[in-house]
Amino acid sequence: MINAIFRMYDRFPRIGLRERTGQQDMSLDIADAYLNGRNAMIEAGVGIGKSFGYLIPSLLINQVSRQPIIIATSSIQLSEQIHKDLRVIGSRLGFTTVRSVVGKGMGQYACRHRAAGLFEPDDPSSPLSTLAQRILNFEIDERADIKGGISDAEWSNVCVNDCIFERCHYKNACLFYDMRTKINARACDIDFIIVNQDLLIRDLIKKKEGTRGIITEQPALIVIDEAHNLEAKVRDAGTLEFTLRRTCRILDDALQILFKQSRDKSLFSQSKFLKSCVERIFKQIDADLLHAAKQDNDRIKVSEIKGIPFSRASRDLRDLSLSLSVLTSRHEREIDEVFEAMNGLIRLFDVLAGVEDNYLIWASNTQREATISICPKAISQFLKYTLFNGKTPVILTSATMCQGGETLEEQYAYLTKSLGYTGDYMDRQSSPFDYSSHAMMYISGNIPYYRHDKRELYLEAAYTEMIKLCNLTQGRTLVLFSAKEDMKYVHKRLISGADEYKWALHVQKEGASQDGVIAEFRGSKGVLLSTGVFWEGVNIEGSDLSQVIIFRLPFPVPADPIYEYKAAQAKNPLKEVFVPDMLLRLRQGTGRLIRSETDLGVLSILDSRLSTAARKDYRDKVLETLPFKKVTEDFSVLERFVKEKGIQRTV
């Protein structure tokens, strides 16, 4: 296999591809890990061609083993890009019959069963009825099919939710049903299964709990791309959310399935009792949120819930779950879904009763509906025994996995501890881009520190500095915010102060197509305000993007229940948790700037905690970790660099 990889890369010049040393070394490391049945961590810097680096050995491993390769990514956009890359590299290297599927979460697919129930013949022109009609007319199969995007609240009405699988009248024309069938196919029927990390983790959870898995049982290799996101994805997948409506629906579904099998009328009184408990719980949650939540996305502590017979409720839930587990039609996916949901409900009641202390719990207003969430405290043991157990070699890769340190073990230490990783550490494959002469990092030292009680003082100073920086590069700037509230404030100020600049202004919109927003930005060469997914995965080469502004260092929120717990487990929370986590995200954001060997640009950080005068212990670690060699706090030095390098709008 090693020789085959060398032969593949020898063919690169003849098939129009450029050989990159880091890419070839990565492929060889992956092949070696597979042959030795070992896991491997590999940091692959921007520009080495990471996806080709793991697709080439994966194609050979699939050919030899006749077993599928699972590739898990952190976003739908990356999944679809890898699918395209697989087609390109596979065909050019002679792999003409590669059978592959992209698997997405059910929330990305339109549900015709739900749409049929929402269409109103008496009011066909209402927004919801029009959307339902388009789905029923096969105009919309996925959320991405809606040009201009759609809000989360609107889409939640029509996306796949608690699929009824085989009983659905629309299953033969459903992309979700077809996808689920393919990713769970026999090993000999599929070659590559490309899923998001959420789906892979959900599969691991289901298999651990003894229910039917989502993804095929016998992969030859698992590759996890953008592995710096894996901890957060595991926590998200392990987080169970309950609203009053969803909880009652779980009980109704269980009642329907069990009564159909047994005709036991006592099930109705059990269900009625459990629903009354649920209603009383959510009545208190509503009161807690009204008292403590300042914003919809605030996570608040759940106060002690009294007056509910939790022991009886837990016993009844367990009886229902046991009855579901022994049904003769046990292997039907619909029953598996209800069985899993019932087990989640049991965990919620145990956490609320105080008999289960391995979970964090909080309340929030998700989509304007009171929601209780529970999340496992420690996920490293889960991954250690379900993913890194030696049954299938696992490759973890990303452009941003390492921190500072002299040895590979030290550099990979934060992710190793967070993920419970066991395996080999491979040499870091550094970016081939010339940061020393093509880029400069500017740290603004004259902005006051951000404090919640003086938030507007910081925002006004940062806004003024941002205007000056965007004017310097004549637009062509991506501004990355770590808080949506900051982005909204700046957007409002820019609209009211339009006489201060001449460039076009763009802002990320909820539910909007990422590609559409980026295309508008590139066309206008303006300024794009963004958060969330724009911190990573965005690839804008050339002079259309000449500056990235980090509005605030992306430290996690200390009061967040997850980070509050992680901090409580650390001897030095700032050094062991908050700085390493911030660095992972900061490296992703700064990686948006230089995307090709000829790119030129400026990275500006509007957070004076990083300035020399602030004397923060983590300044040196940040500068050591980032690839920028030229660093200044003098705006005039930055101006000279921009002028010397010709970073200016071309007419």
Image (cartoon, grey):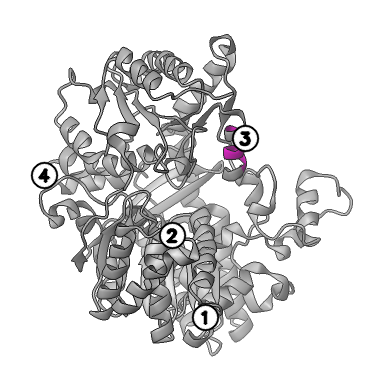
Q: Which residue is mark 1?
A: 190
Q: CA distance from mark 1 to mark 3?
A: 38 Å
For disc 3, the neighbor class at 10 Å (few under 14, some 14 to 19, many from 20) is some
Q: Earlier in the sequence, mark 3 or mark 4?
A: 3
Q: Amino acid at mark 4?
A: Lys
Q: Residue furthest front?
A: 14
Task: Tell which of 609 and 23 is nearer to you.
Answer: 23
Question: How far across and down, in percent of the image, does residue 357 sit?
Answer: 26, 58
Report whether 558 appears left or right of 197.
Answer: left
As drawn, the label of residue 73 is 2
Kindly tell me whether residue 555 is visible in this rendering.
no
Q: Position of residue 11 (x, y in %)?
A: 42, 70
- Range of the magenta residues? 516-521
* Residue at x 31% of width, y 21% of height: 451
Q: Give the amino acid type for the residue marked by disc 1 in the picture.
A: Ile
| Residue linked to disc 3 | 520
Callout 1 touching callout 4 (CB < 8 Å): no
Residue carrying label 4: 571
Image check: 558 left or right of 306?
Answer: left
Q: Where is residue 331 drawn, in percent x and y?
A: 52, 85
Query: x and y percent of residue 446 in the render?
Result: 29, 13
Q: Secondary structure at mark 1?
A: loop
Nearest-to-viewer mark from 1 and 3: 3
**Label 3: which secondary element:** helix
| The quarter of the displayed image where residue 419 is located | bottom left
Q: What amino acid type is highlighted by mark number 3? A: Glu
Residue for point 26% across, 80% down? 35
User: Alpha-carbon distance for marks 1 and 4?
Assistant: 47 Å
Q: Earlier in the sequence, mark 1 or mark 3?
A: 1
Give the number of the disc on residue 317: none
The Cα–Cα distance between marks 3 and 4, rounded to whole angstroms, is 47 Å
